[in-house]
Image (cartoon, rainbow, N blue to C red):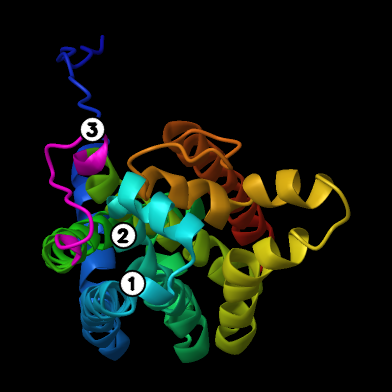
Amino acid sequence: MSVSAPLTPTTTVVAPQRSSNTVGLVKSEWTKFVSLRSTIWSLTLLVIVTVGFTAFFTWFTVAYWDNVDPLAQLQIEADPARQILGAGFQLGQLAVCVLGVLIVTSEYASGTIRASLLAIPKRIPLLAAKSGVFMVVIFIVGEIAAFPAFFIGSALMSSRASVSLGDPGVLRAVIGAGLYLSLLGVMAIAIGALVRHTAGAITGVIGFVLVLAPLAQLLPGTIGRHVAAYLPSQAGSLIASPQQAPGDLLSPWQGFGVAAIWTVLLIGLAAYMLRRRDA
């Protein structure tokens, strides 16, 4: 006669630790981000170019006010913050485009993307962490550039048109400058992930963001005007405008929404291609 061993209850604990994995992934992407040589230079260039060119263009406008077209004078007097925030950021966004591309293509060029994908087999979380870290950093640095640029520009513009953060839409426009740059950064990451080669990706993102809109305006009739209004650079930059100008087809928040849709589509396409292609 055999005696069976007594059964002892067992408890199985499932600990996916998703939160800790997410934190580790974000820390990894942050480490890779700050280890790039181009990071500090590009972010510094963003601040210097934005503040410097804002000050220069505003000073130039005020110094040669009598040579400015009368209609342009009326537009500046009606919405001086639009003039202040528009000049420097048109050039500063180039630094965001270049850095966003390098965040991705530098890994492909060095081969470290293989190690990243071995450590994180699920590629979409990797792309999401990379985009999230870059978006937050660009927003913060964008605001570091936006507020000094506005204060310097408003001081220079005070002899012709007075503007302050308390005016309607102005604070939203200054914060919106950083929001637009952060979306632009994610678009650059998406194009970098799609192209995977630095020179081609930089050419593509600059062409898509800065060149396509002027070309679209060459289309006949009102077609070009409507096409250009819904391109990401034209639509997204409206969030940095305190007021909707008579010629704007979209309001600032509508334009930001259009740019956000472009961003989601591009990063979604990049995620799809990242899953299908080898490193």
Circle on res. 85: 2
Residue 21 percent location from the top left of the image: 25, 48
Left or right, 231 with respect to 188, comes to right
Q: Residues within 10 Å of mark 2 (few under 14, many from 20)?
A: many
Residue 16 lies in the magenta-colored region = no
Q: Main secondary structure of the magenta part?
A: loop
Residue 23 percent location from the top left of the image: 20, 50
Where, quadrant-wise, is the C terminus in this rendering? bottom right
Q: Is residue 115 visible?
A: no
Where, quadrant-wise, is the N terminus in this rendering? top left
Q: In the rendered view, tell whether residue 14 sits above or below residue 217.
A: above
Q: Nearer the viewer, residue 24 or 48?
A: 48
Magenta span covers which residues? Answer: 157-171
Circle on res. 278: none
**Of the residues shown, which amino acid type is indicated by label 3?**
Pro
Residue of label 3: 168
Q: Is residue 135 visible?
A: yes
| Separation of residues labelled 1 and 3 (CA atoms) | 25 Å
Q: Nearer the viewer, mark 1 or mark 3?
A: 1
Left or right, 42 with respect to 97, comes to left
Q: In the rendered view, tell whether residue 64 sits above or below residue 227.
A: below
The image quarter containing residue 59 is bottom left
Q: Residue at x 29, y 53 (%)?
A: 80
> N-terminal of the two: label 2 or label 1?
1
Q: Residue at x 51, y 82 (%)?
A: 108
**Of the residues shown, which amino acid type is indicated by label 1?**
Trp
**Of the residues shown, which amino acid type is indicated by label 2?**
Leu
Residue of label 1: 65
Q: Residues within 10 Å of mark 3 (few under 14, many from 20)?
A: few
